[in-house]
Image (spheres, rainbow, N blue to C red):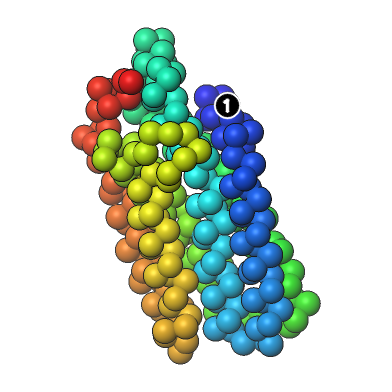
Amino acid sequence: MFSYVIARRGVSVGKMYLAVSLLLLAINIVISLQSGGKSAVMSLSLAMLGFIGLTGAAPVMLLYVYDRNNGTLEYLLSLGMNQLDIFRGYLAASLVIGCVLQVIGSIVILGVGVSLGALSISTLVSLVLSTVMALSAICLAAIFMMSYDALQKQPFGGNQPLGLGVGGLLLVVFMLIPLIFPEFVVITQLAVAVFVFAISMLFVYLSPRFIRREKMLP
């Protein structure tokens, strides 16, 4: 229930980010239409889907900074929640929004691929790996932003937390793979996705050491 409330608030204040996500989806559709059935180009389009999920999750991460500054997190702590309960609530909200946008984008891109007859085993594998990569990037962005004050920008709706830059950089690397290694797209994407997923799970597991109670106070 707590995560649902956070996700709903994130959506309500992040309409601009949802608009950007739709723009990215439109760009992906154009790339898919121009693919001409080439699996490497379709893999590039699917890899770009990660940015849709990360962009959609951005409002929740910014909402955390806003709630921290106005005392909302302090109020939640006073109600008996601990810092991990709060972190997991915001993280779950980020993942839910990111996953929903990822699914919507995947359905659209797959529909375009079916209409072009451009689907193959490698593109379907790239779709699965792009989803894993996107959710892993959201996890890393959330844990970095919530753990370190230096990665937080105070004005809500102003400068992005630098944690988002970490997730974005990883997605850029993943997106460029079909262009750099067109003949080894699946193997290279698999290696990167598994590595980033393992790192994100490690950071989530170690989150009790990174996220301290005092960091949630104004």
Relative to the observer, which residue lies in front, 208 or 159?
159
Q: Is residue 81 left or right of residue 108?
A: left
Residue 156 appearing in the image = yes
**Above or below: residue 112 compared with residue 2:** below
**Above or below: residue 78 compared with residue 179:** above
At label 1, which amino acid type do we have?
Answer: Val
Relative to the observer, which residue lies in front, 76 or 151?
151
* Residue occupying the point 27% across, 23% down: 213
* Residue occupying the point 61% across, 54% down: 20
Q: For the view shown, which residue lies furthest in the right direction?
A: 115
* Residue occupying the point 57% across, 43% down: 97
x, y percent for residue 161: 38, 44
Q: For the view shown, which residue lies furthest in the left direction?
A: 209
x, y percent for residue 203: 29, 46
The mark tally for this picture is 1
x, y percent for residue 26: 68, 65
**Above or below: residue 190 compared with residue 151:** below
| Mark 1 burial class by Cα count in 10 Å: few <14, some 14-19, many 20+ | few
Q: Is residue 36 left or right of residue 65?
A: right
**Above or below: residue 58 compared with residue 117:** above
x, y percent for residue 5: 58, 26
Residue 205 appearing in the image = no
> Which image quadrant is residue 197 in?
bottom left
* Residue occupying the point 39% across, 77% down: 188
The residue labelled by disc 1 is 5
Q: Is residue 205 left or right of residue 141?
A: left
